[in-house]
Image (tube, rainbow, N blue to C red):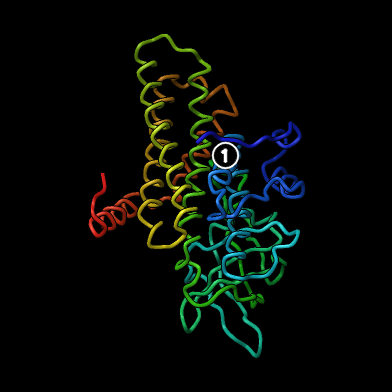
Amino acid sequence: MRPEFALSTELTDAHPADAFLMAHKAGLLDLPLPGSGRTATRFAALAGIGHADAVLARLAEGHADAVAILAELGGPDPGDAAWGVWAAAPDSLVATREGGDWLLSGDRPWCSGAGCCARALVTASTDEGVRLFAVDVDPPAVTPLDETWPAVGMAGSDSRTVRFTRARGEPVGGVGDYVNRPGFWAGGAGVAACWYGVAVAIAERLVDARPTDPHALAHLGAVDTALRSASALLDQVATRIDADFTTTALRLPVRRVRAAVEAAATTTLDRVGRALGARPLCQDAAHARRTADLAVYLRQSHAERDLADLGADLLAAGADW
């Protein structure tokens, strides 16, 4: 898979949140839906955005995922709004029915684009189980909290905690539908495509250095092997998503590709750092920010817990090496 997404100088020079809104307004984030027969194009675009800027990728992927979720679950038309998906820690929000309205209350962490998304899809606990809701990001009912995102890596993603105070929500799908749909897994692979694009940009810093030292060349060879393997798996998963858009078919290969891309990106961070030393981390602002961003972005993975789930799925399905 080759990262493919053309950004103008105006976008690349802008703050990532501003670039996100400009790209959305220009229609650049209108990507093919997963399972549409053009999933590889979708993933290549997400990888391309990640190659340009990790924070922009985080925001763009969230919007593109929201549009796909709304289409899959029969939600409202996304319209012209910039969307986010704020689904971490489902129990942090409670939705209660009052008359004909659903009202959401609680503090939701990790809300990327808290200050720039006009609408969001959020999960919340109900008496029947966890449901998904569409909400307007309008204070005082929905308010991003100051000083809740003091991050260095991914600082520009503005992933603050958002406080919901009897905020009206429009149900999207039924109880449990958010996680029990094929698109949940396709979305997870889309995140991996973003990781891959960021890792490629970091690897290119080593290529551009044109190393001659044998140790640095060995690091470059290891990076190439890791990224090529991850790229091949992303291509395979895109094909699988278009061929069999079902949860049963996608769960194992998506868990595998996320683990593979995470490992490749981790290898890239480590090997490029060892090959080039501290100089680019201290004197190349773009490279330093990109490495810090990727280190945080990768933690959307649940590390060993995800690997354990992959192992369990593999045993249940049978190893197909």
Q: Amino acid at mark 1?
A: Gly
In this rendering, position of residue 273 left or right of residue 112:
left
Q: Is residue 167 visible to the viewer in this orientation of the structure?
A: yes
In the rendering, at what x and y percent does residue 267 appear?
Answer: 38, 32
In the rendering, at what x and y percent does residue 135 appear?
Answer: 66, 69
Residue 304, above or below 183: above
Comparing 180 with 168, the one in front is 180
Comparing 228 with 117, the one in front is 228
In the rendering, at what x and y percent does residue 203 appear?
Answer: 48, 26
Residue 214, above or below 289: above
In this rendering, position of residue 54 left or right of residue 199:
right
Kind of element beneath mark 1: helix
In the rendering, at what x and y percent does residue 181 appear?
Answer: 47, 66
| Residue at the far top in the pictured view | 212
Q: Which residue is mark 1?
A: 50
Q: Residue at x 62, y 58 (%)?
A: 84
Q: Is residue 147 visible to the viewer in this orientation of the structure?
A: no
